[in-house]
Amino acid sequence: MSISSALNNAISGLTVTSRMAEAVSSNLSNALTEGYGKRSVELSSVQTGNVGGGVQIAGITRHSDPGLLADRRLADAELGNRQTAVNSLTRLEQAVGAVDDPNNLVAKLAAFETALISAASDPASDTRLATVVDRLSDLADTLNNNSRSIQKQRQEADAAIASDVERLNGSLQQIEKLNADILRIGSSGQDVSALVDARQVAVDSISGIVPIRQINRENGTIGLMTTSGVTLLDTQAVELGFTPTPIITADMTYASDALGGVTIDGSALDNDGGARRLGGGSLGAAFALRDETLVDLQQSLDDVAVDIVSRFQDPATDPTLTTGTLGLLTDGGSVFDPADTMGLAGRVSVNPSVVTASGGDPSLLRDGMNAATPRASGDAVQLNRWLDALGETRADVVGSASRTAAGRIAEFTSLMGSMRVQAEEQLSFSAARWDTLTQAELANGVDTDIELQTLMRVEQAYAANAKVLEAADFMMQRLMEI
């Protein structure tokens, strides 16, 4: 080997080891960086004719496990779906009151019954009659507040859909731009690992919104589609659209065109607003909450209102009532219509005829709502009828089993509680699966111990090449001295 060849070999060795040291330092400094893929320098020998010409960098490899990454992203979507449901149902249960809450419907009904019992024991007491009206007003107000709480959660779900759509659009546009940069820079032979890292972070940012599949292309770019087959990114990103509804009432649904659905490039997805084809992540959970789960809870709460109003509008309970006259409870001041029950819980109110603040007389509780003449002050017959009506097993709600008033309320609180518990159980499983996949992904990342060992070998190789360079320089100097 000539001295010049030795110099060339040593210089190429120094160049390669310098680049390897750079890769190791990058790995170590980004050991905790989200989305970072470990780099390694691939080497190949240089041949000049039949003579070795040193070493060269064949390329920079960014390490990742596509299968594990895909599974973890699907776990992201499942976790986002479960977490969204749990958060909403937990907030609702806190607002409405759990089973043991002293301010929930069960407690308000019990307080009303207690007041009735007290009044029946002393029908002549105006104070006790007024207390009955107050406790009934509390019950009606609680129904109203619970209905508002449910609709508030539907509004928040609607706003969450808008937020998810905005995030999807922003990230898809970012990924489209990164695709273009990777294609342009990669075609010139430069390292694009940093751009791939940034693209992975961008894809990960939307993997919790919808379950996605990544399609890798030979030119380094990627495509994205949902697991249900909706294309999100081909050569260009699609544009998703959604119009939020600031105020939602119980009668507003997507089916009635009162609520918005997701569009892609201006076209509607399905007749469910996109809930099915974009389901599986936080976006699908928000649709399910707005259009299904919370609607079912509102229906159950309306069933409670129908049950109680019907009991007090029945002539068997109050013989003074006739067709078209207001009972003890009203539908927003009007006579309750059994054909119009949607949202009743938010409209139910006490008949102003017994509310002192509205100019009414609480003694009508003792006499009957439309009594032509007052009963004797010590007559508790009508008060006992109100009590009996609450304890009677009835089926005023179409398609439901017979229940007492307390049983109907328990049905609602049980439904809400079971929904929350089931959602929490599903979240626990999803979180455990996500954590397992995340830990497995991290295990395939940067191992600092291995990187330090590599750094020591790089240091030794660099020193050896420097020594060769020093020896060649010494030999050249000796030749110059002759």
Image (cartoon, rainbow, N blue to C red):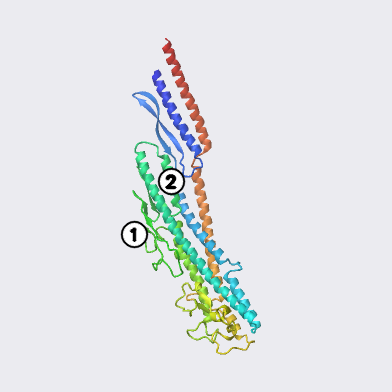
Foreground residue among 332 and 3: 332
Disc 2 residue type?
Gln
Say if 51 sits above or below 22 in the image. Answer: above
- What residue is rendered at 50% in x and 38% in y? 29
Nearest to N terminus: mark 1 or mark 2? 2
Foreground residue among 457 and 467: 467
Residue 3 rendering spot, x and y as whole percentages: 40, 18
- What residue is rendered at 49% in x and 69% in y? 298
Disc 1 residue type?
Ser
Mark 1 = which residue? Answer: 267
Disc 1 crowd rating (10 Å Cα; few below 14, some 14-19, many 20+) is few
Element carrying mark 1: strand
Residue 387 horizontal side relative to residue 279, left or right: right
Instruction: List the single residue furthest toward the bottom.
Output: 373
Where is residue 248, by image quadrant? Answer: bottom left
Say if 122 sits above or below 457 in the image. Answer: below
Mark 2 = which residue? Answer: 200
Placement of the C terminus among the 4 image quadrants: top left
Instruction: List the single residue furthest toward the right.
Output: 122
Q: CA distance from mark 1 to mark 2?
A: 28 Å
**From the viewer's perspective, is the residue at label 1 or at label 2 nearer?**
1
Residue 205 rendering spot, x and y as whole percentages: 45, 50
